[in-house]
């Protein structure tokens, strides 16, 4: 691995060793000559959190490497779960972007294999093999593929839509890298969580406060969940915990709320805590579901049986006899 | 059990089943890591007992003689604590299992040997009925006596599955075990560490793959943007798996972007092509019961045990081509004849001997009596 790679993949063992060898302690980042690194870390966080876009800039490897580390410390210092999760996801997407580029353009097969073994093998215990006949075609075990692909809801990720032979799935560069996005995000998240910092240097603290003031603090839904069916409560709980909801759960939550008479704005607000929240996309989708866009068809709330098939049903005795979540509580009211 | 047997039938079956397990202590196939499996038993009153475990076959045999169950099942899963409630069992992994049953296959002659029995009064009709002529009950149960044509259809489907498992999933045929279910289907178990820890969702995707469900034209490089058709053959080509099957079926092997595009336009465009591809996947896909494959907490009939719906045993088919369920899965001794009252006109080939039975009393060999009484098509005199 070259030193430039450390900036792109700063969580690798080699990057850790490099940082160790410099003998820099966290307190030293309070010195004015490191202001540019703190400034860059702030820019990187603000860019990702505020715009929801990946920060793709690369400078000098050592600066980028320290920027990454300082940004993690700042995120730790900000200490807001939704910000941490969003940042980790966007940093994972940053890595994804560099990795796709490197794998696609690296001509030296040995180097390519080394990169694959470092990222996929060492970090995630995932064996990827280069196809001997087609350039930039990768193979992985069906089981390794399924463990990851089943969290995606798009039809293209179904095994039937892949080239499969002899227990292996064939994937192109983008598909292979996309499969590990979630794991990359968790890796970075765990790094932040594992940091044991007793006292943050004042300068870092002040940068973190400044970022904290800028980024919008997500709305705590505090929804009176008791009136909703358990499936809806579960979805809201996940959003409150800044967890990502599968596509089917988002569809279900949005159609339910819209049918209950909530306005598009209110429904969009519900999703603000999702780590991958993008207002433009959410607005488009919610307006589409409410019949304001596209085919102008208002989508209906899926039936309980469909939700059960998609593992979105969290049946309790109060659900007895209902066929659609919209019927929840009606019996109780009638009694 | 098909319907609740009368006292005489019940006594006859219980005695026969007990004798079977007493005389054939080595007939049950010991599951791999028996102590990690959950066992379940059905009794003749159709009550199920689950969450039972045994350390060895000796313990199981003793249980069988004491309790004489009508059906024996064990989990395809392995657990740390198989006797605990489901969410406390601590799941370790599971074998891959598949169920191919006549009910899921379009057999042309199925209705010719399907019987309809009233669950209330036991009257049998050869015509499809929704209401019992005698007692007006709507609880009608259908019973099939599979014919050689149906058995061959089942075998063909099983072979299709085996080819998917070996070619696409890379499972060594040595570790694929084919069983006759004891009634109207085949059970297939594949033991492969690579698939051992897959969860229900992943198994569901495997089942979908085998059945040819959710094919997307995008996977063949065919997309529709608004009204324009775009064709770009995928990087991994059409050399493997479903892509290969579809392209070969369309006689388009070695096709280029242009040729595929021309072909699609020729047959009427994107929608027509989609229909054609879906027809192919429906035809080539294996007709398994997906719920069996995706369920990691299922208990599956034990090999060597009797299927109470037929009195035949679940047995391994070492040679699928020559396997005859009415000979190879009939493990009761033919040492005596039994007088029975047959409830309907029926034909049966049992151990290569043809039986033409009518709505009257008959004396038949012991295994035939077991079969017909289990099927609720005859009563013991």
Image: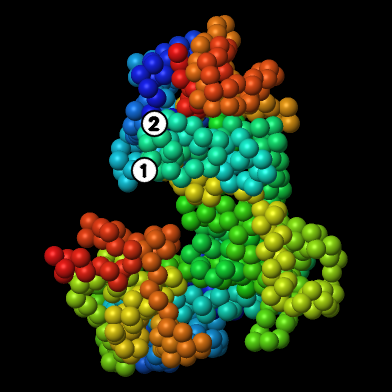
Compared with residue B60, is residue A285 higher up or lower down, i.e. above or below?
A: below
**Residue corresponding to mark 1:** B90
Percent position of residue B171, x then y = 65, 43
- Regarding mark 2 in the picture, which secondary structure is present there? loop
| Quarter of the image with the C terminus of chain B in it | top left
Q: Is residue B285 visible?
A: yes
Q: Nearer the viewer, mark 1 or mark 2?
A: 2
Q: Residue at x 69, y 75 (%)?
A: B271
| Quarter of the image with the N terminus of chain B in it | top left
Left or right: where B274 falls relative to B50: right
Residue B327 found in image quarter:
top right
Q: Is residue A117 visible?
A: no
Residue furthest top as drawn? B335
- Regarding mark 1 in the picture, which secondary structure is present there? loop
Which of pointers 1 and 2 lies earlier in the amino acid sequence?
1
**Residue corresponding to mark 2:** B121
Q: Residue at x 38, y 73 (%)?
A: A301
Q: Residue at x 51, y 78 (%)?
A: A93
Q: Nearer the viewer, residue B81 or A216?
A: B81
């Amino acid at each position: 691995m070259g030193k430039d790679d450390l900036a792109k993949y700063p969580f690798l063992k080699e990057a850790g060793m490099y940082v160790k060898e410099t003998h820099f302690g966290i307190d030293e980042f309070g010195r004015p000559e490191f202001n540019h690194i703190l400034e860059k870390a702030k820019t990187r966080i603000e860019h990702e959190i505020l715009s929801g876009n990946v920060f793709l800039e690369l400078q000098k490897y050592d600066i980028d490497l320290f920027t990454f580390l300082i940004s993690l410390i700042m995120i730790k210092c900000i200490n807001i779960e939704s910000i941490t999760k969003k940042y980790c996801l966007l940093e994972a997407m940053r890595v994804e972007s560099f990795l796709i580029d490197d794998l696609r353009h690296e001509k030296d097969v040995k180097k390519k294999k080394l990169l694959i073994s470092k990222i996929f093998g060492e970090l995630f215990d995932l064996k990827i093999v280069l196809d001997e006949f087609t350039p930039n075609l990768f193979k992985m075990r069906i089981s390794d593929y399924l463990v990851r692909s089943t969290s995606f809801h798009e039809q293209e990720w179904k095994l039937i839509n892949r080239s499969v032979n002899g227990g292996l799935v064939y994937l192109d560069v983008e598909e292979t890298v996309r499969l590990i996005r979630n794991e990359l995000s968790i890796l970075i998240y765990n790094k932040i969580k594992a940091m044991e910092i007793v006292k943050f240097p004042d300068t870092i603290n002040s940068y973190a406060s400044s970022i904290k003031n800028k980024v919008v603090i997500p709305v705590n839904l505090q929804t009176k969940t008791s009136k909703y069916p358990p499936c809806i409560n579960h979805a809201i709980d996940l959003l409150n915990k800044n967890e990502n909801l599968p596509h089917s759960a988002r569809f279900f939550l949005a159609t339910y709320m819209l049918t209950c008479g909530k306005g598009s704005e209110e429904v969009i607000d519900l999703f603000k805590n999702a780590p991958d929240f993008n207002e433009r996309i959410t607005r488009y989708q919610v307006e589409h579901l409410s019949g304001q866009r596209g085919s102008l068809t208002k989508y209906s709330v899926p039936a309980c049986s469909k939700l059960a098939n998609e593992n979105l049903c969290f049946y309790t005795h109060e659900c007895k006899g209902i066929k659609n979540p919209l019927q929840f509580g009606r019996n109780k009211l009638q009694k | 059990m098909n319907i609740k047997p009368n006292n005489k039938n019940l006594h006859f079956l219980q005695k026969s089943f007990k004798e079977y397990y007493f005389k054939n202590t080595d007939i049950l196939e010991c599951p791999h890591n028996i102590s990690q499996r959950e066992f379940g038993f059905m009794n003749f009153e159709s009550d199920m007992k689950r969450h039972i475990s045994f350390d060895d076959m000796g313990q199981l045999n003793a249980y069988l003689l004491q309790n004489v169950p009508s059906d024996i099942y064990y989990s395809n899963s392995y657990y740390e604590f198989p006797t605990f409630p489901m969410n406390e069992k601590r799941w370790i992994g599971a074998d891959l299992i598949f169920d191919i049953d006549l009910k899921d296959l379009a057999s042309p002659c199925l209705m010719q040997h399907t019987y309809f029995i009233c669950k209330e009064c036991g009257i049998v009709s050869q015509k499809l009925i929704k209401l019992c002529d005698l007692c007006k009950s709507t609880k009608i149960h259908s019973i099939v006596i599979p014919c050689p044509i149906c058995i061959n259809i089942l075998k063909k489907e099983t072979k299709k599955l085996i080819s998917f498992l070996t070619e696409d999933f890379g499972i060594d045929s040595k570790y694929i075990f084919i069983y006759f279910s004891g009634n109207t289907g085949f059970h297939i178990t594949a033991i492969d560490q690579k698939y051992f820890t897959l969860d229900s969702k992943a198994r569901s995707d495997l089942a979908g793959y085998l059945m040819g469900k959710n094919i997307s034209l995008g996977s063949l490089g065919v997309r529709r943007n608004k009204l324009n058709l775009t064709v770009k053959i995928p990087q991994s080509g059409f050399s493997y798996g479903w892509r290969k099957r579809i392209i070969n079926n369309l006689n388009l092997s070695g096709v280029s972007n242009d040729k595929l595009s021309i072909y699609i336009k020729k047959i009427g465009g994107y929608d027509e092509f989609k229909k054609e591809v879906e027809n192919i996947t429906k035809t080539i896909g294996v007709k398994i019961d997906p719920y069996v494959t995706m369920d990691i907490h299922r208990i599956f009939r034990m090999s060597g045990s009797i299927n109470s719906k037929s009195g035949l045993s679940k047995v391994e088919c070492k040679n699928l081509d020559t396997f005859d369920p009415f000979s190879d899965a009939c493990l009761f001794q033919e040492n005596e004849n039994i007088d029975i009252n047959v409830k309907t006109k029926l034909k049966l080939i049992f151990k290569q001997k043809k039986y033409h039975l009518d709505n009257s009393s008959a004396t038949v060999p012991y295994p035939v009596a077991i079969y017909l009484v289990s099927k609720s098509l005859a009563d013991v005199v």
